Amino acid sequence: MLWALSLAFVIGFIFFRSLSKQQRDIVLARIHLHRRRTSGASTPPRSLTPEKTEKPPPKEKAPTNVPSVIDYKDVFPPSRRAPLETIATSLPPDQKHKLSISTSSPVVSRGSMIPLTSPIEDCTSPAFTATELSNEEIEALGDFPDYAELSGVPLPKPCHEFDITKALPRPYRPFRWSYHQTMSLTKMDTDYWLELENTYIDRISQRQQLFRENGKNVLQYLPGSELACKELMEMSLQFLCARYPHYFSLSESKTTFINNILHTTADLKAMHPLHVLLDNVPEDFAVMLRDPDDGIYYFRAGVICSSLGWDVGSKIGMQLSEIHAPIPDYKEKMQFSMDRYFAKLPTDRPIQRGSWGLEIDTPLWTPSWHPHLALRNTQLPSSTLPPSRIHLRVDWQTLRRLPLSGSIIFNFKALFTPISEFRNEAYIPALCNKVLKQGKKSIMEYKGTWHVEHVAIPYLEELEREQVERGLVGKEWEVRTLDESPWFPGWEEKWRGKQGF
């Protein structure tokens, strides 16, 4: 549930910021936090400092303009019809006449929607997606249309110096202090939507093995998701070909994808799009589709190989509120903002953020029944848990709407870094340690770091002292979120230096 919790926090923060000051004050007054479970471990107990302790605010009524139940059937994202006129100029003559260049009436397009469970090919008369494109127009656009123009999100700049044998992910360190339930959100860096690294070959092999062993618990698609899956695959392959042109290409007919890292080809007409992604893109994708009957988004397809505590098979077909049901107070405090954000998200405003935790070793896929999760319930003796086994896990996440299907794609990638790497990363040991020791109990419960804190905290304290002694960190520095967040001072020089460019 790590990605689901993170996404709930993200959307809750966006909704919170959209309220007036008076409404925000009222919402804050209604928040209640649960206590953390009691532990007999040697990890120092967390407690709120006196300056954080406040008197309970007076009770107030909830904002009258925030309904407990809302109908999203008539709430839509912005139309993407405008780019059709530009794209039509580059189409062959026999395709141009199929495009309706003039903007259709919302009454017409919104009243004839493609059903949630129906493949677009089954529509015998004009039917529309949530972004106001008809089945006939989508057919006229053909394979691999100009998604940059359609979405308003540019393709990445080519990275000719990229060497897959040396490539490292950017060193994400999304630590913040003070640490609370507001997320640090940024516009997605379009050059890094899909980020490759030197583990590419091994990671693709691992993901393929996970699918062979676990099937629909890793990869699954339901009726009606055909267009969204094809669109996601085409956008992903377009990205790879634009970003890494010396490694990836499409045949002239755009029916074959050529991978010069794996030395493989993929027949795009014979393979399901999610299998193409499984075999070529080391990212997880969850496809959320809008049901025209209620305006709510449902998890209809996905390839997910790095989930923590859940799997595709246990969540497929669920709507947002059902997916997030295990999260305390979701229905009362988060469901409205989540549903509203999904209903209105434009295609040209993708977001990115990172969540983090600490893991023993580098477990990639840990569904609810995985034995590795049992380690979170105990603290291993220090003799069997040296600091070298403790890793920072960062899930770098993006959320975006696709322009044709109107589907919403949540994708994320698990990155593991041994905490020993923090030794030469200024301020990072102190920041991480501050959160571990003084972070809010309810949030740290979700992170599940307790099982390694008895080793991680003293080790990070040692690194803190070293950095002060070496002059890397000033003695008087007070722990706070870094200006360079989610990175650290000098990160790019270190990152590029290790790759040789």
Image (spheres, rainbow, N blue to C red):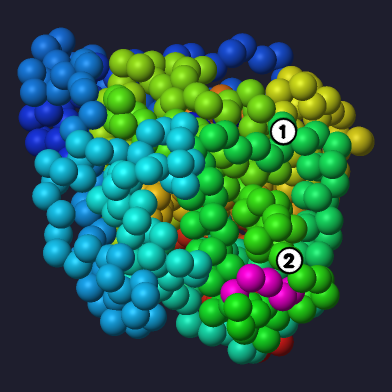
For image coordinates 48% across by 82% down, the residue present is 157
Of the numbered discs 2 and 1, the one sitting upstream in the chain is 1
Q: Residue furthest right?
A: 383
- Name the element at disc 1: helix
**Which residue position is annotated with label 1?**
216
Of the pair 211 and 140, the residue shown nearer to us: 140
- Name the image quarter holding the N terminus: top right
**Please, what is the three-letter code of the amino acid marked with disc 1?**
Lys
Q: Residue at x 41, y 22 (%)?
A: 321
What secondary structure is marked by label 2? strand
Query: Is residue 280 at all visible to an observer of this figure?
Result: yes
Structural crowding at the residue carrying mark 1, measured as other residues with C-alpha within 10 Å and reported as few (<14), some (14–19) or many (≥20): some
Q: CA distance from mark 2 to mark 1?
A: 21 Å
Residue marked by disc 2: 266
Q: Is residue 387 left or right of residue 465?
A: right
Can you give x and y, in whole percent of width and height, for residue 337 in the image?
Answer: 28, 31
Residue 13 on the magenta segment: no
**Residue 491 marker:** none
At horizontal 82% and vertical 75% (from top left) the residue drawn is 263
Please determine whether, in this image, residue 190 is positioned above or below residue 323. Answer: below
Instruction: Judge from the rendering whether residue 109 lies leftward or rightward of residue 120; answer left or right.
Output: left
Q: Nearer the viewer, residue 92 or 170?
A: 92
- Left of 226 or right of it: where is 28? left
Give the amino acid at mark 2. Ala
Residue 434 percent location from the top left of the image: 52, 42
